[in-house]
Image: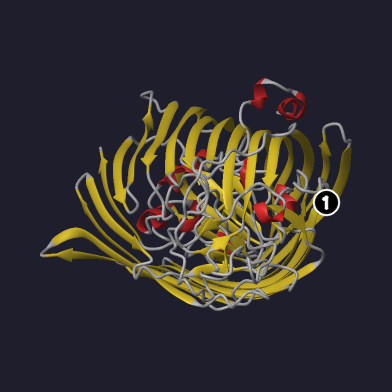
Amino acid sequence: MALAIAFSLSAPAWAAVPAEAETPDPQATTLDHIVVQGQSIGYKADNATTATKTDTPISETPQAITVVTGERIRDQGAQNVQDALNYAAGVRSDAYGLDSRTDSVLIRGSSPQEYLDGLRSSFNYYTSTARTDPFTLERIEVLRGPASMLFGQGSTAGVVNLVSKRPQAQTRREIGVQLGSFDRRQVNADFTGALSDDGTWLYRVVGVYRDSETQVDHVDDDRRLIAPSLTWKPSEDTSLTLQLRWQQDRTGSTSQFFGWSGSIASNPNGRVPSHRFIGNPGDHYDTDRTTAGWLFEHRFNENWTIRQSFRAARNKVDYASAYGDPFTDPLNPFVDPQQRLIRREGWYANTDVRMQNIDQHVEGHFNTGAVAHQMLLGLDAARFKQEEQQLFEGAEDRGGTMPAIDIFNPVYLPHTPPPFGPAVKSRQRQVGVYLQDQMHLGEHWIVVAGVRHDRAKNGLVGAGSEESSATTKRLGVMFHDWAGWSPYLSYSESFTPVAGTHAITGARYRPQKGEQIEAGVKFEPAARDLSFTAATYELREENRLVSDPDHPNTNIQAGKTKVSGFELELTGKLTSSFDLTAHYNYLDNDKQLESTPRHQAAVWGKQRFSIRGRDGFAAGLGVRYMSAFDSLPAPTTPSVTLADAMMSYDTGAWRWALNVNNLTDKRYFSICMGRGDCWFGSRRTVGLSATFTF
């Protein structure tokens, strides 16, 4: 196994297969755990692997973690990962509203790192990756707060770990059709089962074909995806799962970067409609993504197990977009006194990313006196290579070549951008070694302690490189099962080497660092499929990537910042036929950071029922609330309350479902930023799906 690590860091070519999107999970390679993930478990998950890299009960984990199960993703009709997190505690899922390019979420006021099966899916911002389709997922695990002791590459916000569908022994074939708003037409399929009579070979094939428009004129949302996987299980102690994925997305940018005037503030010409497109003909955001990897596990005996996960990925993004320029003069972004013609900028990028990730660890169970240990010793490594051609085109009245456009009656004229310059090549390598011990002291006390050391090299071809290293720690103490109540206290740190450079200045990014203190309590009443969590925290961080106020498609780094808050979450079954998930978040963040609502709350419930003696009916209703907040000098982003609904009917092999998000078709903004722009939220979307299982 150690040879594979050296290979992933030094072997150049064939491992350069893909880059930026998928990733295997170091711990979910446990086949028994995979089977659990494949079952319908309602809304409450008992165990999770993201917080410890071991299959650990959530009630015994001294850190806040939320699991969005596959059933919940399906019931809520999530069309992307951002939608799937609408009702996740501690998460702001529509941080930047409707965005066809990426899933923009915040956890505790900061942007988390996205992982797929326990390995990081991206080493730069959205132009180096592609969106993961929720149909390919079994569940989403959200770890809130620093996680560098285990992952080494997670931000202070935490980790969003997407757990992909794996081969199952039980045969199940599913074909589904979706029709919905904005001419959405999708066909998806999921086939799994055994290839051999003795269950030694298992397979799974997941596919998605979609043609769709979006809320914004002239912006499509088309996808072609196939994800086959194969499991070899020669014995109960050994399993190897091979994973492949090919994905092609053809879309554009729904983010048009309108100014305050005409969106949230008054304009003598009225309001800009949420479907307005002010780009150029041919604008696009096209992604081609290919990944290949494996998940391996071997159990030597009842006490010792070794696991390895590897993923190679390649991702290409071709991006061309003309958009509003309210940044130069937020109070007057127009070039005419009638306040119709808004300045525009252009951003163009061709990005080619190759990435390899590997993680391997040994898990051991043993006792020292009265202390039971679950020890984890691991080593992971990553290599990231990016070649990117970038071009920025300024507004015509400011010396550039991009003409203004009438936002109330746009006329789309052909436009040819200047040619690209030479590609900028960036590289990053990272190796980390970690040690974790989950200790049970007596009947009730749990202590989780860990330490990790990382070394990273980040550089530009032809301009040298920078090396950095860090040691990160974690300590958590919990008193478990005190009449169902389990209070805990934890401390954790983060260290994240940041690849790439500022697109305008060329300055390299510095490593991002953070630390968190969290106190909370978890409660699981006896004989009830129900869980409650309360947590309060304080986060300190430095060098976080934030949007450049002068250029919306680039990032700069903030100085030292602080965020504090608390969260409440309730998930499970209130009755045998009623599932519920609800949460409340309070957040107070530093003025250097983008403002976020102090209060968020959401509740979703699903009732199963019969009609005239016929079972199989279900109805769901959810409400999401966000308080008003200020991003000075922008006008206040108003509070908003949104409703979502679902009706479904299961009969035999068929499932029919109707989902409506933003039920009242509310026109709202997720944020109006101090730099000058406002981001539209998603309008009402209606989806009808039919699924046949055989």
* Image height of 314 relative to 534, above or below: above
| Amino acid type, mark 1 | Arg
Residue 483 at x, y percent in the picture: 54, 75
Residue found at x 64% / y 36%:
350
Name the residue nearer the viewer: 389 or 299.
389
Quadrant where the N terminus sits is: top right
Name the residue nearer the viewer: 295 or 73.
73
Q: How many marks?
A: 1
* Image height of 548 relative to 201, above or below: below
Residue 209 at x, y percent in the picture: 38, 37
Residue 101 at x, y percent in the picture: 54, 48
Q: Is residue 670 left or right of residue 71?
A: right
* Image height of 656 relative to 586, above or below: above
* Image height of 221 relative to 313, above or below: below
Name the residue nearer the viewer: 678 or 590.
678
Residue found at x 33% / y 35%:
171
Q: Is residue 667 left or right of residue 539?
A: left
Residue found at x 37% / y 53%:
74
Residue 127, image quadrant? top right
Report helix, strand or loop for mark 1.
loop
Q: Is residue 429 left or right of residue 669?
A: right
Residue at label 1? 510
Name the residue nearer the viewer: 168 or 396.
396
Q: Residues within 10 Å of mark 1 (few under 14, many from 20)?
A: many
**One can see residue 156 in this view:** yes
Farthest residue in the left direction? Answer: 612
Report the coloring of the rendering.
secondary structure
Quadrant where the C terminus sits is: top left
Residue 417, image quadrant? top right
Residue 671 at x, y percent in the picture: 57, 68
**One can see residue 55 in this view:** no
Residue 198, image quadrant? top left
